Image (cartoon, rainbow, N blue to C red):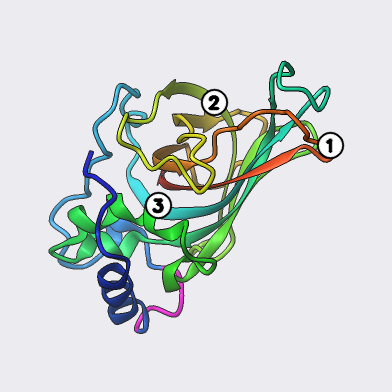
Amino acid sequence: MLSPSLSLLTTLGLLLTTTLALPTAAPPFHVRAKQSAAPSLPASTLPSPPAGTTLKYVALGLGTQNYTCASPSASSPPMPAGALATLYDATARLSLPSGAVQIPKLPATSLKSSNGLGLPQLGQHYFTSSLVPSFDLAAASPPLFLSAHKAASAPAPADADAGPTASGAVDWLELLDNGRGATRGLAAVYRVETAGGKAGSCEGVGAGGMQVAYAAEYWFYG
């Protein structure tokens, strides 16, 4: 994986130049004109996308990984309590000649931003009250939704951005449709190129738990 060392100003300049002409979510890759082949997922030990699926969108997720603590003690392990993130449409970035280089740097760079680096909003990622990971791509055409479950995970690369608290990057994941009937138009999503999001110590953490800033790429297949 490439190091997240691209100049913030350079990245912002590239993004602003291209996204000013993209006020809405980009169309799915398999219908994009002049696209000879869909790009491949970043290399990892995660399984390949399900047979018969195609890449629909690549999104930049920017938000928090959430944790609870049984007690405000360093000996109390933080427990995952879902995540909340806004998804920004980065699909068009891979249509540019430099797209393969730029996309891996977006998560680390976006941690310094609060607006998804000017990319158009695609939807929301959240967990239900029963901790079901959900992805609502309301701005997709047509709208898409994935009610998922974690199928596989892989540690983030050693050189991944550790985030603003230096606690580390969360794992890369494969999430599949959970078969509960809520999914529309999607079969899988991969969380890759993560930056930040790992929990720190529970010492001094109150009943509200902790929210750790993170960013990641989400590759949607259907």
Going by the picture, which residue comes out furthest to the top?
75
SS class of the residue under badge 1? loop
Q: In the image, is 31 to the left or to the right of 98?
A: right
Between marks 3 and 2 in the image, the one whose residue lies nearer the viewer: 3
In this view of the protein, can residue 133 be seen by the observer? yes
Which residue is tagged 1? 206
Closer to the chain start, of discs 1 and 2, is: 2
Q: Residues within 10 Å of mark 3 (few under 14, many from 20)?
A: many
Q: Which mark is residue 192?
A: none
Q: In the image, is 181 to the left or to the right of 186?
A: right
Residue interval drawn in magenta: 21-25
Between marks 1 and 2 in the image, the one whose residue lies nearer the viewer: 1
Provide residue 178's location: percent of width, then percent of height. Answer: 60, 28
Q: Which mark is residue 150?
A: 2
Quadrant housing residue 148: top right
Q: In the image, is 106 to the left or to the right of 147?
A: left
Label 1–label 2 contact, CB within 8 A:
no
In this view of the protein, can residue 182 be seen by the observer? no
Relative to the observer, which residue lies in front, 174 or 29? 174
Rounded to the nearest angstrom, the CA distance separating label 3 from label 2 is 21 Å
Q: Residue at x 48, y 40 (%)?
A: 166
Q: Residue at x 50, y 63 (%)?
A: 140
Rounded to the nearest angstrom, the CA distance separating label 3 from label 1 is 29 Å
Q: Which mark is residue 107?
A: 3
Q: Residue at x 32, y 72 (%)?
A: 15
- The amino acid sitting under disc 2 is Lys
Magenta stretch containing residue 152, yes or no? no
Q: Residue at x 43, y 69 (%)?
A: 117
Q: In the image, is 10 to the left or to the right of 197?
A: left
Relative to the observer, which residue lies in front, 170 or 125? 170
